[in-house]
Amino acid sequence: MTIPTPTLNRNPSKATTLLIAVLFSGWLSPVIAEEMTSHGSHVHGEAQLTFVLDGNEAELALVTAAGNIIGFEHAPMTVEEQQQQKTQLEMLQSGRWFVADTDANCTMAGQEVRAEPDEHDHGDLFANIQLLCQAPLKLQNLQFNLFELAPGLSTIKVQFLIDGEAGVQELNANQSTLKLRD
Ligand SMILES: [Zn+2]
């Protein structure tokens, strides 16, 4: 079985590690696991996000075709492209592409964002954000502004794991709120 992701390459993130644990433990149905595998490829217009909440620590791991966010997928070739890439990477680093419920009292505890340009014009972008939440049980929704900030993006396929409970959800500009609990 192929593990779909993104952030596997060097230092598996907490989200990735937990997600793998879930996949292998069979908590998710085979149908979902199969679907997730087929979403492992680079698709224009689409991003994949894993969200894990474990105690009061949370992590978001986003992977997307670079063009969805930056507008191109090669290494920047002009001053304008450099600037465009810088602006969008800073936007991802800032964490302002999503909003957690205020009551959960989450603050950003760390981030890692990188672009991996590709000579064949199919580079990827990776963004990992760690959060610390003082009232994690009050975290019910994550709202994504990313569709406004990244006009090339039309869909975010989300896999989430909250205190051991897994779910999947698909977001778009009209449905940009991830519901974590009922
Ligand atoms: Zn591409």
Image (tube, rainbow, N blue to C red):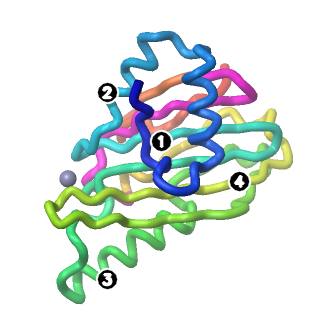
CA–CA distance between discs 3 and 1?
25 Å
Q: Mark 2 points at which residue?
A: 38
Helix or strand or loop: what does disc 2 sit on?
Answer: helix
Which mark is on residue 49? 1
4 or 2: tag closer to the N-terminus: 2
Q: In which quarter of the image is the N terminus?
A: top left
3 or 2: tag closer to the N-terminus: 2
- Residue 164 located left or right of residue 42: right
CA–CA distance between discs 4 and 3?
28 Å
Q: Name the residue under label 3.
A: 83
Q: Residues within 10 Å of mark 4 (few under 14, many from 20)?
A: many
Do tag 4 and tag 2 residues touch (Cβ < 8 Å)? no
**Residue 16 higher or lower than 76, as above or below:** above
**Residue 27 higher or lower than 52, as above or below:** above
> Any magenta on residue 88?
no
2 or 1: tag closer to the N-terminus: 2
**Residue 4 higher or lower than 31, as above or below:** below
- Residue 164 located left or right of residue 167: right
